[in-house]
Each structure stands twice: as structure tokens, then as C-alpha cells.
Image (cartoon, rainbow, N blue to C red):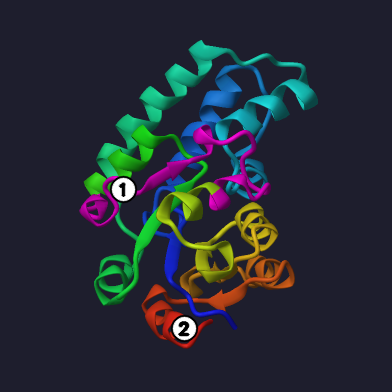
Amino acid sequence: MSRIELVIFDCDGVLVDSEPIGNLVLGASLREASVPVDDETVASLFRGWAMTSVVAWAEREHGRALGAEFLTRFQDHLFRALRHGIVSMPGAAETLAALRLPVCVASSGEPDKMRLSLGLTGLLGRFDGRLFSATQVPRGKPAPDLFLFASRAMGVEPERAAVVEDSLAGVEAAIAAGMTVFGYAPEAEHDCSHRQQLAAAGAKPLNDLRDLPRHVATGG
């Protein structure tokens, strides 16, 4: 096992508890745009997806071309909802304080959303200037582009980077990048099938963020 020199965090569902809010807003926005999709499908299908992938899915599966106006309206609704309800994930601040390695964020979300979410939860100071978005690379997750871009920017070889992810697309991206990946699935979610799915894709189980520093110190 290579010595870990960098920890790359996904943002939504790993550092901040934004996914329930985002899923509700996205489902409502899609239905408003005449895309027939229920909230359960949004939560299971789009986990870890970039908005460009969601837009492509709507056109491919339902023949709906969602333009810039849709994206602007969705972002306005999302930012308003985040300001009224976002919190950090359990143990996030404690984990970041305990880590003795460089850290960064690599997310499918746009930079403005990351800055808002991390700022509202008091975590931005740990990552300011080290936020990487799928909007900066040709392909989003599950392609490895974003994680490779982040590790290169941080000056660390991919095999010496560890990724913390809660989505299958993110785990697949990290594995494709040649990185150690921890599949974060909190016990509170009671979703054994999702936890098993992440493990089957190659992720090391992580049920509590506060266990991460110990795993990183031992190389995984």
C-alpha cells in the first residue's frame, strides 16, 4: 500500500448534508420542466452526477432540451434552499482538524455551490483555494478526469492520494484514477445495499468520518 499524501473529499453527502435538499429541488425543477421523474428516482439515479449529465439524461430519455434558463432557475432555487437548511455531515469538522495531510475537494458541483455550502457550514477555510469542480475537466465522474486534475494541481501522484466518496460514480472515478477510495456510507442511512454497492466497486468501507484519520495513517 502506497503512503497516502493527500486526501480528496467529495463535497455533497461527504462534507455537507446537501443531498436531500438538492434532490428535492432537482426533482421539482425537472417536473416543472415537464420531465416526469419522482423524488426516489432522483435520489438513487443522479447521486454523484454533474448537472451536465442530468441535462443530457433528460434529453436522451425524455426528449427535453433543458437550456441555460433551466439551469439558472434550478441554481436560484437550490441556493435559497441551502441557505435555509444545510448542515455539515457528522464529524466533518472534527475529522478535518485531526488530519495531518493536505486536503482538497473534488466535486461534480459548480464552484459557487461548493463555496456556498462549505461557507455556510464553516468548512470553507479548510479548503479555500483547493476546490476542484467537474466544470474544469472534459468529463465528469465516473471518468477519472476530475480526481487526476485535483491531484496534479496539488502536486501529488495519483497512487498517493485517497478519495472519500459517497456515490458509485465517484468511487468508479477514483478507482479509474488509481487512487485509494473510501466509500462513505453513514450508519444512520441504514442503506446496506448502497454500502455494498460501493464496496463491490472497490471502495474501502467508511461508516464514520471520524475513523478516516486512522485509516489514512495506516495507508488505507
Quarter of the figure with residue 50: top right
Q: Amino acid at mark 1?
A: Ile
Which segment is the magenta one? 121-148
Q: Is residue 123 left or right of residue 59?
A: left
Of 172 and 132, which appears nearest the observer?
132
Q: Residue at x 68, y 47 (%)?
A: 143
Identify whether 213 is placed above or below 108: below
Question: With respect to residue 118, does 14 lie above or below?
Answer: below
Residue 106: x %, y % from top left: 47, 50
Q: Is residue 53 magenta?
A: no
The residue where tag 1 is placed is 86
The part of the image, by quadrant, that contains residue 179 is: bottom right
**Circle 1 residues within 10 Å: few <14, some 14–19, many ≥20:** many
- The percent position of residue 17, horizontal first and vertical second, equals 39, 54
Which of the two labelled residues, at mark 1 and mark 2, occupies the earlier sequence position?
1
Where is residue 173? Give x, y as percent: 65, 54
Label annotation for residue 193: none
Between 196 and 205, the one lying in front of the other is 205
Residue 130 magenta: yes
User: Where is residue 81 shown, x and y percent of the image?
Assistant: 34, 35
The one of 149 and 65 positioned closer to us in this rendering: 149
Q: Which residue is mark 2?
A: 215
